[in-house]
C-alpha cells in the first residue's frame, strides 16, 4: 500500500532526483513498495543509489509477471545486484533471472553469500539461469541439479561462461556435459561462441520447439527469423503447445499466424494478436463455433476498425462480441437505420436469417432475403424467469447488438411484434432509452414492465412509475433494488395498490425470499419498519424475530395494523411469540406495550388508534427529537416514519444539534436528508460554511471525504489545502481506482511544485514532519520550505 510520502513523490514534477535520493536516505525504504509507480527518473536514481536494503525492497515491489513492469524488472536486473538476484531466483521469469546473473559482480561480498545459498538449491528452475553467470561452481552445480532438463543452448552457454571465467572444456568433470552439448573438449572459444549463437537463435528455438516447447526458453529469444520458422512449419507442422507459444508472441507476423492457424486454429485465435488476416481466415471444419467466438471477441476487445468488423465472418459471432463488450459502432447505427429502419417485416426477416448466415454483418444487412418471409416472430419464446436475471448470449445477443444500434423509434415500432423473450433481452440487457418507460406503462403486455423492473440502473423516479403497474412480479424486482424509496417498500409489503385493483399480493418468489431468512450468516433482508404495515401475517410475525420494531408509538402502530387486518386473535398470536434472536426478553414487543394492549376492553382498539394518530404527527415527532441529547439517544433508534421535510424546516427555524440529525441518518432516511445532515461536515456544507472553515476543525474521514468529492461538494484541492492531518489526507488516494488517483494527483502536484520542488532539504524536513503533522498537506510543505530557506 502506498505511503503518504510515496504519494508526495508521485506528485512531484521534475526534480534533482539523485540529490533528492541522497538527501532522503533511509526514508526511501518506507516508500520502496511504491517505486513502480514513481517517475522513471526517480526509479532509476533509486536503483543507482546502490543501497542494498532499498534495492531489495524495490525488487519485491515490482510485479513478477506483469508486462507493464517488464522494463522495471530489466532495469533492476541489469544492476547485477545480489539482492535483486535473491528475489529473481524464486519469483521472476527466466529472461529476467538470466539478466541479473549475467550482470553479477564476483567481487561483491553479497554475491559470495548468495552463491553459497544457491549451491544448496536443488530445483532446476532455481539454478538454470546461473549458466550465464561468472561463477563456474554455480554453473557446474546447475549441470548437476538440472542437467537433464537443460536445453542444448543452456549447456553450451554454461560451457562458454566457464571458459570465459578461466575454465577449460578439458576438465574431466565437464566431459559428459560437453558430449551432450554436441561439442568436444578441443573446441576453441570462437567456435564455442558460434555454437552458442546458433543454439540461442532461431535454429535452437526450432529444435527446442520440436522436442519440448517451453515458454521461458522461447522468451529468451528477443528476435526470431520468422521465415525460417515458417519454412520449418511447412516441412513439419509444429505441435499445439509450440504453435501457442509462437502465435502468442507479439512479433509473430500475420503470414506465420495464418500458417499456424491452418493446423491449430483454436490455439492460435486464443493467443494471437488480433488482425485483419486472421479475422478473415476461413473457419475450420472442427471447433468452428469456438474459433469464431474467440477471434471475434479478441477483435472487438482490441478495437479493430469498424470497417474490418463489419466485413468479418460470421456475423453472429461478431455481433455477439459487440454486445458482450458493450460496443455500438456508429457505422453499424447508420447501416441499421438505412437498411432496416422501423420496417417490422425487414427486422423479422433479418431475425430469421441471422442464425444460419455465414457471411459478414455487411452482407447480412445489405443482402436481400430469399425464400418465404416468416409470418410470426422467428424463434419466439416466452419470457424467462425474471428472478434469475439471465444474461443474453448466442444468437439472442447478436440480435440484441443490432437492436442496440437501432434508433428508439424503431424499438417502439417493434415492441408489439417481438416475442416476450426478445423483449426481455432488449429491455433488461439493452442500452437504456428513456422512452421505454412510457411504452411499457402504456402496453397491455406485462412482459415490458417486468423486463424493465429487472434492471439495476433504474433511478428512483422510474422505480416509482413501474410500481404503479401493481404487478407482483414487478414489485418483487423493485423490492430488490437499492434506489427505491422507503415508502414504496412499505407499500409493497402492505399490498396497497396504486389503482383500483384491490390488494396486490406479494410475488411468491419475494415472499419465499423474505420468509427464508433464519438469522445467522448472510445479510438480513429486513428493516426496522418492515413488519409494521406488512399485510402478510406469517411474514409480519416472522420479521420482528430478526429485526425488532423499536419505540412505543411504532409498536402500537404495529399492533393496530395487525388488529385491523387480522382481528384480535392475530394480536394474541403476536403477544404469544416467545422465541427469536432479536426479541425483548423472548417477546416481539416491549413489556410496557404488551401490558397496554392486553385485556378484553372493547374500546381498546379505538383508543390505541387515537393515540397512534396523535403520536405520528409532525408536532409529536419534533417534540420527541427536542428531547434527544446526542447521536445515541434512544429516540433516534426508534422505528418511526419520520416526517423528514418537517424536521428539515424545523431545523432551519430552530436548529437541532448536528449530531442529533446525524443520528437520524439510518436506513429509511431519504438520500437528500442524509447528504445534508449525516455528518457535521455535511451539515456545515449544507449551512453554507466554507470547506476551509469546516476542515480546520473536522479531521479527515476517508469514506465521507471520498463521497463528498464524488458528489462535487468538496474538491481534492480543498482536501490538500485544508484537510488534516496531512498523512490521512494523502492516504485517501490509496483507496481509489487509478483514474480517480490521477485526479487527486493532479490537484496535489501544484501544491508540491509551489513549495518543496527542487529543494531536497525541504523534502527531507517534510518527510520527517509527515507522520505526526496535525495540519494540512499544504501547511506542512510550506512550513518545510520556509524552515529550510
Image: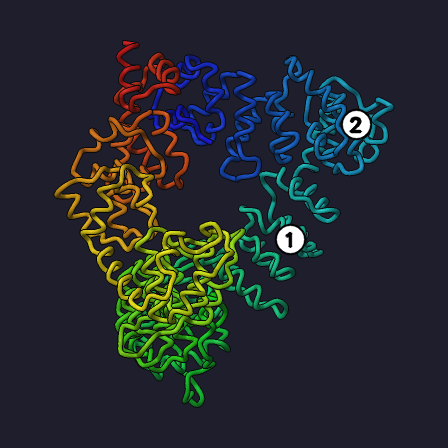
Q: Is residue 596 left or right of residue 512?
A: left
At label 1, counting other C-alpha atoms closer than 10 Å, the crowd grade (few under 14, some 14-19, many 20 or more) is many
Along the line of sight, the residue nearer the viewer: 679 or 740: 679
Quarter of the image for residue 177 reads top right
Q: Quadrant of residue 139?
A: top right
Q: In percent of the image, x 21 and y 36: which residue is there?
A: 684
* Front position in the image: 324 or 595: 595
Q: Which residue corresponds to mark 1?
A: 243
Whether residue 409 can be seen here: no
Position above or below: 147 against 260: above
Against 253, residue 727 (above or below) is above
Q: Is residue 645 left or right of residue 716?
A: left
Q: Secondary structure at mark 1?
A: helix
Residue 397 in sight: yes
Q: CA distance from mark 2 to mark 1?
A: 35 Å
Residue drawn where x is 67% and y is 37% of the image: 200
Q: Is residue 343 above or below residue 11?
A: below
Left or right: 742 in relation to 36: left
Q: Residue at (31%, 64%) from the top-left corner?
A: 604
* Earlier residue among tags 2 and 1: 2
Please give the residue where the numbered disc 2 appears in the rendered image: 187
Q: x and y percent of residue 742 in the render?
A: 35, 37
Q: Nearer the viewer, mark 2 or mark 1?
A: 1
Up the image or down, 246 lies above or below 351; here it is: above
Residue 54 pos. (x, y %): 52, 20
The picture places residue 447, in percent across and down from the top left corner, at 38, 76
Amino acid at each position: 500500500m502506498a505511503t503518504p510520502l510515496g504519494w508526495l513523490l508521485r506528485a512531484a514534477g521534475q526534480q534533482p532526483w539523485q540529490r533528492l535520493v541522497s538527501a532522503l536516505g533511509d526514508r526511501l525504504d518506507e516508500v520502496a513498495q511504491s517505486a513502480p509507480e514513481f517517475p522513471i527518473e526517480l526509479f532509476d536514481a533509486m536503483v543507482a543509489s546502490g543501497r542494498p536494503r532499498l534495492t531489495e525492497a524495490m525488487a519485491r515491489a515490482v510485479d513478477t509477471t506483469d508486462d507493464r513492469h517488464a522494463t522495471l524488472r530489466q532495469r533492476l536486473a541489469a544492476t547485477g545486484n545480489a539482492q535483486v538476484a535473491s528475489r529473481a531466483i524464486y519469483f521472476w521469469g527466466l529472461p529476467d533471472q538470466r539478466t541479473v546473473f549475467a550482470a553479477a559482480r564476483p567481487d561483491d561480498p553479497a554475491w559470495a553469500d548468495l552463491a553459497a545459498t544457491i549451491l544448496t538449491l536443488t530445483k532446476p528452475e532455481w539454478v538454470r539461469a546461473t549458466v550465464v553467470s561468472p561463477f563456474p561452481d554455480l554453473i557446474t552445480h546447475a549441470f548437476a541439479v538440472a542437467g537433464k532438463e537443460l536445453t542444448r543452448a543452456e549447456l553450451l552457454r554454461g560451457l562458454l561462461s566457464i571458459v570465459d571465467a578461466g575454465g577449460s572444456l578439458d576438465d574431466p568433470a565437464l566431459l559428459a556435459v560437453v558430449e551432450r552439448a554436441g561439442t568436444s573438449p578441443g573446441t576453441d572459444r570462437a567456435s564455442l561462441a558460434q555454437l552458442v549463437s546458433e543454439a540461442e537463435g532461431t535454429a535452437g528455438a526450432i529444435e527446442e520447439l520440436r522436442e519440448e516447447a517451453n515458454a521461458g526458453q522461447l522468451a529468451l529469444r528477443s528476435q526470431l527469423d520468422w521465415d525460417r520458422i515458417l519454412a520449418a512449419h511447412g516441412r513439419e507442422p509444429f505441435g499445439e503447445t509450440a504453435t501457442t507459444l509462437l502465435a502468442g508472441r507479439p512479433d509473430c507476423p500475420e503470414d506465420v499466424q495464418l500458417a499456424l492457424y491452418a493446423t491449430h486454429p483454436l490455439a492460435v485465435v486464443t493467443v494471437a494478436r488480433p488482425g485483419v488476416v486472421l479475422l478473415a481466415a476461413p473457419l475450420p471444419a472442427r471447433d468452428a463455433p469456438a474459433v469464431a467466438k474467440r477471434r471475434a471477441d479478441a477483435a472487438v476487445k482490441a478495437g479493430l476498425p469498424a470497417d474490418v468488423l463489419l466485413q468479418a465472418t460470421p456475423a453472429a459471432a461478431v455481433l455477439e462480441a459487440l454486445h458482450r463488450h458493450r460496443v455500438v459502432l456508429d457505422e453499424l447505427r447508420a447501416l441499421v437505420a438505412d437498411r432496416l429502419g422501423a420496417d417490422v417485416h425487414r427486422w423479422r426477416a433479418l431475425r430469421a436469417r441471422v442464425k444460419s448466415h455465414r457471411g459478414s454483418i455487411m452482407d447480412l444487412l445489405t443482402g436481400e432475403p430469399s425464400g418465404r418471409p416468416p409470418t410470426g416472430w422467428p424463434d419466439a419464446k416466452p419470457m424467462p424467469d425474471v428472478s434469475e436475471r439471465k444474461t443474453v448470449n448466442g444468437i439472442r445477443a447478436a440480435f440484441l447488438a443490432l437492436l442496440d444500434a437501432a434508433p428508439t423509434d424503431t424499438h417502439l415500432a417493434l415492441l408489439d411484434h417481438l416475442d416476450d423473450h426478445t423483449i426481455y433481452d432488449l429491455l433488461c440487457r439493452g442500452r437504456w432509452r428513456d422512452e421505454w418507460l412510457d411504452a411499457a406503462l402504456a402496453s397491455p403486455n406485462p412482459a415490458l414492465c417486468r423486463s424493465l423492473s429487472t434492471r439495476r440502473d433504474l433511478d428512483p423516479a422510474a422505480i416509482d412509475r413501474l410500481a404503479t403497474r401493481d404487478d407482483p412480479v414487478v414489485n418483487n424486482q423493485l423490492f430488490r433494488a437499492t434506489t427505491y424509496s422507503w415508502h414504496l417498500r412499505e407499500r409493497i409489503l402492505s399490498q396497497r395498490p396504486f389503482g383500483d385493483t384491490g390488494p396486490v399480493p406479494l410475488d411468491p418468489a419475494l415472499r419465499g425470499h423474505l420468509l427464508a431468512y433464519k438469522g445467522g450468516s448472510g445479510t438480513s433482508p429486513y428493516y426496522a419498519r418492515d413488519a409494521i404495515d406488512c399485510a402478510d401475517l406469517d411474514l409480519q410475525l416472522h420479521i420482528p424475530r430478526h429485526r425488532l420494531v423499536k419505540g412505543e408509538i411504532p409498536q402500537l402502530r404495529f399492533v393496530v395494523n395487525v388488529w385491523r387486518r387480522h382481528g384480535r386473535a392475530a394480536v394474541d398470536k403476536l403477544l404469544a411469540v416467545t422465541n427469536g434472536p432479536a426479541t425483548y426478553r423472548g417477546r416481539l414487543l416491549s413489556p410496557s406495550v404488551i401490558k397496554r394492549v392486553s385485556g378484553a376492553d372493547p374500546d381498546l382498539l379505538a383508543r390505541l388508534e387515537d393515540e397512534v394518530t396523535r403520536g405520528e404527527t409532525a408536532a409529536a415527532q419534533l417534540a420527541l427529537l427536542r428531547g434527544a441529547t446526542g447521536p445515541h439517544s434512544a429516540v433516534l433508534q426508534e422505528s418511526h416514519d419520520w416526517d423528514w421535510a418537517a424536521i428539515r424546516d424545523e431545523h432551519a427555524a430552530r436548529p437541532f444539534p448536528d449530531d442529533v440529525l446525524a443520528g437520524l441518518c439510518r436506513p429509511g432516511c431519504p438520500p437528500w436528508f442524509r447528504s445534508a445532515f449525516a455528518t457535521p461536515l455535511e451539515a456545515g456544507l449544507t449551512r453554507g460554511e466554507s470547506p476551509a472553515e469546516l476542515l480546520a476543525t473536522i479531521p479527515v474521514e476517508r469514506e465521507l471525504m471520498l463521497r463528498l468529492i464524488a458528489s462535487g461538494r468538496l474538491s481534492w484541492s480543498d482536501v490538500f489545502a485544508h484537510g488534516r492531518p496531512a498523512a490521512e489526507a494523502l492516504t485517501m488516494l490509496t483507496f481509489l481506482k487509478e483514474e480517480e488517483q490521477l485526479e487527486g494527483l493532479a490537484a496535489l502536484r501544484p501544491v508540491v511544485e509551489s513549495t518543496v520542488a527542487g529543494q531536497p532539504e525541504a523534502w527531507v524536513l517534510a518527510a520527517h514532519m509527515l507522520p505526526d503533522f496535525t495540519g494540512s498537506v499544504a501547511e506542512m510543505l510550506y512550513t518545510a520550505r520556509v524552515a529550510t530557506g
